[in-house]
Image (tube, rainbow, N blue to C red):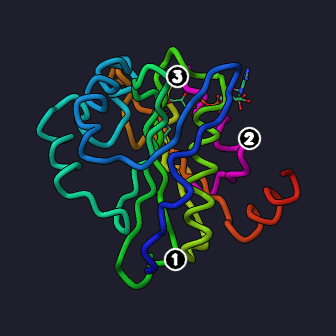
C-alpha cells in the first residue's frame, strides 16, 4: 500500500462563510481532539465504535499514528478548535486490502454546513489515489440520525442491513446499515462536478 503524500494539507475551505482547515491528525492535536469529543453529545458518542472521551484512547491513537492503517483527517476552525474528525481505515489482510472504511463525526454546532461531506470527499480522494476500490461505512440506524441520508447524498449505496444488530440509547434494537462507495465511478462523477 503506497504511503500517501500529505502535500495537499493543510487545505482551507470556505464553508458558509467560515474558514475550515482540513489536516491530518498530529501529536499536537491531542487535547483539541479530546475537547472535540467532549462537545459531541452523549447520544452521538453512544453509536461510535470506541470510547472517545477516554484520554487513554485518544493518547493511544496519537502514539500509534500510522496513516497507512488509519488516516484521521481533522477539520479545524479559525479558533483552532477541532470541529470534525473523519478516519479512513484500511486492512492489510489480503481479501480486504482493496476496501477502506470511513468513520466520521462532526461537532453538532457545525453540522449542515457541508463539513462532513467535505471530509468524506477528501478521504475518498485519498482512498482512490492510493489504490483502494471501495469505501464502506457502517452506520447505526438510530432515531433522528441523518448519517445514512448524508452518506447516500455523497454517492454511497446501501448494500446490507444487519437487522436489530445494535441497540439505541434507550435499549431498543435498531439496524446497522452498511453502505458502499465504488471509488472508480465516484471519482469520474466527482471530477465532472468540479
Ligand atoms: C453524519 C454527519 C457526519 C454529517 O455531518 P455534516 O457536517 O452535518 O454533513 P453535511 O453538512 O455535509 O451534510 C448534512 C446535510 O446538510 C446538508 N448541507 C450541506 N451543506 C449545507 C448548507 N450549507 N446549508 C444547509 N444544509 C447543508 C447536506 O445536503 C446534508 O443533507 P442530507 O442529510 O439531507 O443529505 C453528522 O451528522 C454526525 O457527526 N453524526 C454523528 C456521527 C455519525 O453518525 N457518523 C456516521 C458514521 S460513519
Q: Tell whether position 34 is magenta.
A: no
* Residue 34 spot, x, y in % from top left: 25, 29
Image vertical order of residue 184 relative to residue 186, above or below: below
Q: Residue 59 vs residue 180: left or right?
A: left
| Residue 87 drawn above or below residue 32 | below
Q: Residues within 10 Å of mark 2 (few under 14, many from 20)?
A: few
Q: Residue furthest right?
A: 192
Circle 1 SS class: loop
Residue 55 placement (x, y as % from top left): 14, 33
Q: Is mark 2 within 8 Å of ligand 1?
A: yes
Disc 3 and disc 2 in contact, CB within 8 angstroms: no
Q: Quadrant of residue 184?
A: bottom right
Q: Which mark is residue 98?
A: 1
User: What mark, if any, has residue 153 been given in the picture?
Assistant: 2
Query: Closer to the N terminus: mark 3 or mark 1?
Result: 1
> What x and y, as percent, mark residue 178?
54, 52
| Residue drawn at the location 46% of the way across and 27% of the way down | 83
Near mark 3 (Cα within 10 A), the count class, few <14, some 14-19 or many ≥20, is: few
Picture mark count: 3
- In the rendered structure, which disc, 1 or 2, sits on the residue that comes first in sequence? 1
SS at mark 2 in the image = helix
Residue identified by numbered label 3: 143
Up/down of 33 relative to 188, above or below: above
Q: Quadrant of the N terminus?
A: bottom left
- Residue at image location 57% in from the left, 61% down from the top: 135
Question: Would you call the spot at circle 1 few (<14 residues within 10 Å), some (14-19), or many (20 or more)?
Answer: some
Q: Magenta segment: does it hold 151?
A: yes
Circle 3 — which element?
Answer: loop
Amino acid at each position: 500500500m503506497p504511503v500517501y503524500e500529505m502535500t495537499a494539507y493543510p487545505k482551507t475551505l470556505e464553508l458558509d462563510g467560515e474558514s475550515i482547515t482540513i489536516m491530518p491528525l498530529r501529536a499536537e492535536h491531542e487535547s483539541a481532539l479530546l475537547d472535540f469529543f467532549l462537545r459531541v453529545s452523549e447520544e452521538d458518542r453512544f453509536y461510535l465504535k470506541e470510547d472517545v472521551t477516554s484520554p487513554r484512547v485518544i493518547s493511544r491513537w496519537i502514539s500509534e499514528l500510522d496513516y497507512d492503517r488509519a488516516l484521521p483527517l481533522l477539520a479545524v476552525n479559525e479558533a483552532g478548535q477541532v470541529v470534525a474528525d473523519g478516519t479512513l481505515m484500511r486492512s492489510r489482510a489480503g481479501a480486504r486490502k482493496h476496501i477502506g472504511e470511513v468513520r466520521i463525526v462532526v461537532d453538532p454546532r457545525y453540522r449542515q454546513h457541508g463539513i462532513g461531506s467535505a471530509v468524506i470527499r477528501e478521504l475518498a480522494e485519498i482512498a482512490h489515489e492510493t489504490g483502494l476500490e471501495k469505501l464502506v461505512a457502517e452506520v447505526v440506524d438510530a432515531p433522528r440520525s441523518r448519517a445514512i441520508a448524508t452518506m447516500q447524498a455523497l454517492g454511497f449505496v446501501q448494500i446490507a442491513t444487519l437487522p436489530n444488530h445494535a441497540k439505541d440509547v434507550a435499549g431498543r434494537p435498531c439496524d446497522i446499515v452498511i453502505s458502499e462507495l465504488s471509488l472508480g465511478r465516484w471519482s469520474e462523477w466527482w471530477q465532472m462536478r468540479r
